[in-house]
Image: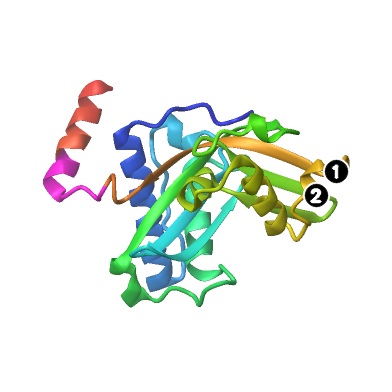
Amino acid sequence: MAYDFVLGPDEKREVLRIARATVSEFLCAGRIPPGRPHRRSLLANAGAFVTLRCGEELRGCIGTQAEDAPLYRAVQEMAVAAATRDPRFPPLQLEEIDGITIEVSVLGDRVVVRDSREIEIGVHGLAVSCRNQRGLLLPQVASESGWTAAEFLGRVCGKAGLPAEAWRASDVTVERFTAQVFAETEYPPLDPQEILAQVMRENAAR
């Protein structure tokens, strides 16, 4: 079942905090921090991508469509993978961490599409599969690149190593998906006083 929680500002900030703390801990000690959050929205299974940027430049991006782990754990694992296993970049070094901006994409429902008119740029991401060939592009990629829906389809096929028009073939499956996309530029880490106030609000609500 697709992830159906709508994350609020505090939840998004916590997800980003988890991602940053995980990368820092892994680069320092080679491990993922123990513990788990209390929010139900972070304990529900979800697919997620973590993107690292240095200024405007991509520094790593890896994710999973599989909904077989809680959101917080998927974010932890993908944050480590984006920092250390993206084949396009050398592994992130500890001294780089302060200059990195983290973005998280929490994937929503998926629908098979056969026509470019079914795709809304900036709203839908695309995933393509054909036997053992797969490719995926997040919603923000198309809007940032200024692609049309038809160009988006061609690009995601290229990501899978397929011809640009392969999406028209009967043995190729193309799915659109939604995503909640948020970054530290919108939700920067809280200072200690803000964290204390947030904890007090949460305790009062229980």
Who's the residue at 63% across and 48% down the image?
Answer: 151
| Chosen colour scheme | rainbow
Q: Quadrant of the C terminus?
A: top left
Q: Which residue is mark 1?
A: 169
Picture coordinates of residue 72 (x, y %)?
46, 44
Hey, which residue is sitting farthest top in the picture? 205
| Three-letter amino acid code at the position of disc 1 | Ala
The amino acid pointed to by label 2 is Ala
Seen from the viewer's position, the closer of residues 129 and 24 is: 129
Q: Are marks 2 and 1 in contact (CB under 8 Å)?
A: yes
Estimate the spatial distance between the alpha carbons at disc 2 and disc 1, rounded to whole Å.
Answer: 5 Å
Is residue 116 inside the magenta stretch?
no
Indicate the secondary structure of the residue bearing disc 1.
loop
Q: Residues within 10 Å of mark 1 (few under 14, many from 20)?
A: few
Is 127 in front, or is 84? 127
Instruction: Give the camera-side residue of 99 and 200.
Output: 99
Segment colored magenta: 188-196
**Which residue lies at the image location 66% right of the left edge and 43% below the top edge?**
150
Q: Quadrant of residue 86?
A: bottom right
Residue nearer the viewer, 126 or 131: 126
Mark linked to residue 166:
2
Horizontal side of residue 138 vs 160, given as left or right: left
